[in-house]
Image (tube, rainbow, N blue to C red):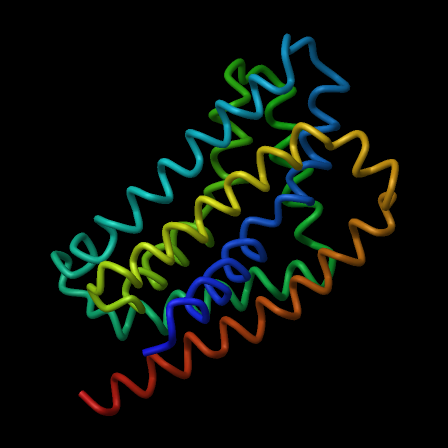
Amino acid sequence: MPSLFELFISSFITFFVVIDPIGVATIFLGMIGRQNIGSPSRLALRATLIGFTLMTLFAFVGKPFIESLGISTQAFRVAGGLLLFFLSYRMVMGYHESDMAEASAASARGHRDLAVFPLAIPLLSGPGGMTVSILLMDKAKGDLWHQAMVMAALLSVGVISFITLCSARLMLRVIGQGGVDILARVLGVILAALSVQFIADGVNALIVH
């Protein structure tokens, strides 16, 4: 089992890459530019709280839920790794931005509570994030300190996501849309490597068992 620091760093990177706070912030910026939403910071806070509450819930009850369906954690690691690899492919190829743009466009067509949709779901707590929550908590293997490190990493990314949403205009002015696109592709490559590791761990556990 990795050390507490190693687990925190790997969990932080995984959550950050999957959630992509900077990419979400660019969509948030487009939303607040088109609609009268009141206080952007209040909307960002609500969205962050809802999204990361959902991910925390999946982190603690996700494993018992899938096991109640007769799905082993080893099989879920493989399936989750494949899902994350698909997400990483879309990020590298540029399809990730179109997915986010579609969610933003859907919000403009009449969804009133933007904090719930599309910000909290699916941008901040989509299928990838929920899957990673389950996989990382399973990696902690029931150890309270290791679970605390996973949750600390999730909380850290949640705080960063809130700050990024609140400073979306400044961030886009500094790095530009081109910088956002480059960063998304770099994160996609990292996510691809992480997903392969999840698959390898799952396959190895299936063979051993």
Where's the N terminus, which quadrant? bottom left
Foreground pick, 87 / 11: 11
Q: Quick one: 11 or 22, which is closer to the camera?
A: 11
Residue at the image position 34 percent from the left and 84 percent from the top:
203
Would you place residue 25 above or below residue 2 in this image? Answer: above
Q: Quadrant of residue 33?
A: top right
Residue depicted at 29% across the width and 66% down the height? 140
Q: Position of residue 110 (x, y in %)?
A: 58, 15
Where does residue 155 sit, x and y in percent of width and height? Answer: 44, 44
Q: Could you tell me which quadrant the C terminus lies in? A: bottom left
Residue 16: quadrant of the picture? bottom right
Query: Against 106, is 181 above or below?
Result: below
- Give left or right: position of 20 versus 142: right
> Which residue is the extreme one toward the bottom?
208
Spot occupied by residue 178 in the image (x, y as percentages of width and height): 87, 50
Residue 206 quadrant: bottom left
Residue at screen point 73% across, 28% down: 29
State left or right for residue 22 relative to residue 136: right
- The residue at the point 55 percent across, 64 percent down is 86
